[in-house]
Image (cartoon, grey):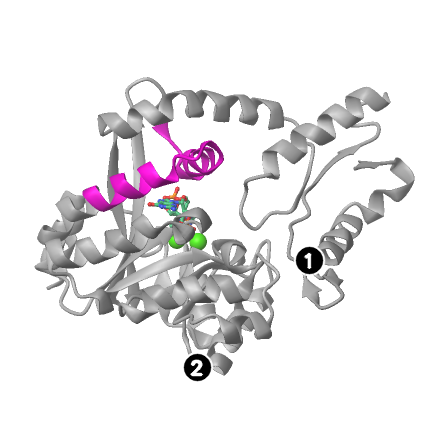
Amino acid sequence: MVISPSRKDKVEEEPTQMIRLGRTLKTNSVEAFFNVNIGISQYPENGTDAETLLRNARVALDHIQYTPGQSYALHEAGLENRLKEELTVGSHLPKALENGEFHMVYQPQYDQGRIVGIEALMRWESPILGEVCPDVFIKVAEEGGWMTDVTKVVFSLLEHDLPEIKQYMNDIRLAINISSSQLMDRQCLQGFAELNTLTGMPAEQLEIEVTEGAVIGDVEMIAKKLDKFKEKGIRIAIDDFGTGFSTMTHLEKIPADMLKIDKSFVSGYPDETDGNVAALVIRTAKTLGIDVIAEGVETKEQKTFLEENGCTLHQGYYYSKPHTLESLIKLLEKTE
Ligand code: C2E
Ligand code: CA
Ligand code: CA
């Protein structure tokens, strides 16, 4: 899509409308689900001839194609560099997965001063590239079809770390991020069963975090997949909530135990957001009778705002950054 200067005010509105149109298509008795992705370049910032404008729109499209929850993107400076970075990451990732260059870090979740949960987050320390951001390598792994290997690595790391953490866990939950392709992969559910057997970690203390972007689409099919986790006793949290297009009807079908307010609606308060979306997500969770957690809590002001709106479950730098296994154990020892 190429936008001319006279239609600049429509630069967000038009793609959003087209994407909505795409999602709701019905043919006779059949309901068809498909995603519309739009790459946008603007004249004259992104080019002054048709060829350059189309090429840059294509670059923007390539960028979003595998980004969960994002359906359109404007071409911007640095996009080509990011694509190059992703290519470099992709060329090192398969070997890194074999070579054991990954470890897990753990970020505590607090309820009124008490640790009630921990989110496991993957880290890649590459001897060649240095520390690679998980947002980047997870996206590249999705694109390259390496998520089954990522799943194997995550479970083997958790199997190693959990016996030590478990001594301090009592009723603390462990949340594990699951991407849309991991959700579709049988090995992932199998991984949870093995984790349960090998570490003795009760399924009821395990939680999967699935992004809102991953549960939009064929809701019936996704709900069936999620039910399989639920049947094992594993809890389901909807991550990055507020960034997608979920409706109440979606949520009624999905067996969610918790909504996780996206950090952009929390860490941006009060400078970049008035907090209305966060407050709305809290009310939505209360209406559905499920839990709600806020991530990205960075200041006392944000903590107070959330508490005043009825959300006491928090995660963020105000409380703690993600910890290595060793420093998590020290923290849990102290708080026992
Ligand atoms: P996420 O699941 O939304 O994880 C939260 C991210 O926010 C983490 O970044 C965390 O370090 C960061 N964060 C925590 N508190 C704050 C805060 O107060 N302020 C700000 N600005 N950020 C905060 P991280 O570790 O870089 O992870 C990025 C994303 O990578 C995750 O987003 C998740 O989507 C993905 N990811 C990480 N580990 C895994 C994994 O094992 N499997 C899968 N499928 N995805 C993973
Ligand atoms: Ca998460
Ligand atoms: Ca999140």
Residue lying at 45% horizontally and 69% vertically, measured from the top left: 306
Quadrant location of residue 138?
top left
Q: Which residue occupies the extreme front position in the image? A: 29
Mark closer to the chain start, 1 or 2: 1
Tag 2 secondary structure: loop
Q: Is residue 16 above or below residue 205?
A: above
The response on whether ligand 3 sits within 8 Å of label 2 is: no
Quadrant location of residue 65?
top right
Q: Is residue 70 above or below residue 306?
A: above
Q: Which mark is residue 98?
A: none
In the picture, the quarter occupied by the C terminus is bottom left
Q: Return the residue at label 1.
A: 23
Q: Which mark is residue 289?
A: 2
Residue lying at 26% horizontally and 53% vertically, measured from the top left: 190
**How packed is label 1: few (under 14 Cα within 10 Å), some, or many (20 or more)?**
some
The percent position of residue 214, horizontal first and vertical second, equals 50, 54
Residue lying at 50% horizontally and 82% vertically, measured from the top left: 287
The percent position of residue 300, horizontal first and vertical second, equals 40, 61
Write down the region rendered in magenta.
131-156
11 displayed left or right of 160: right
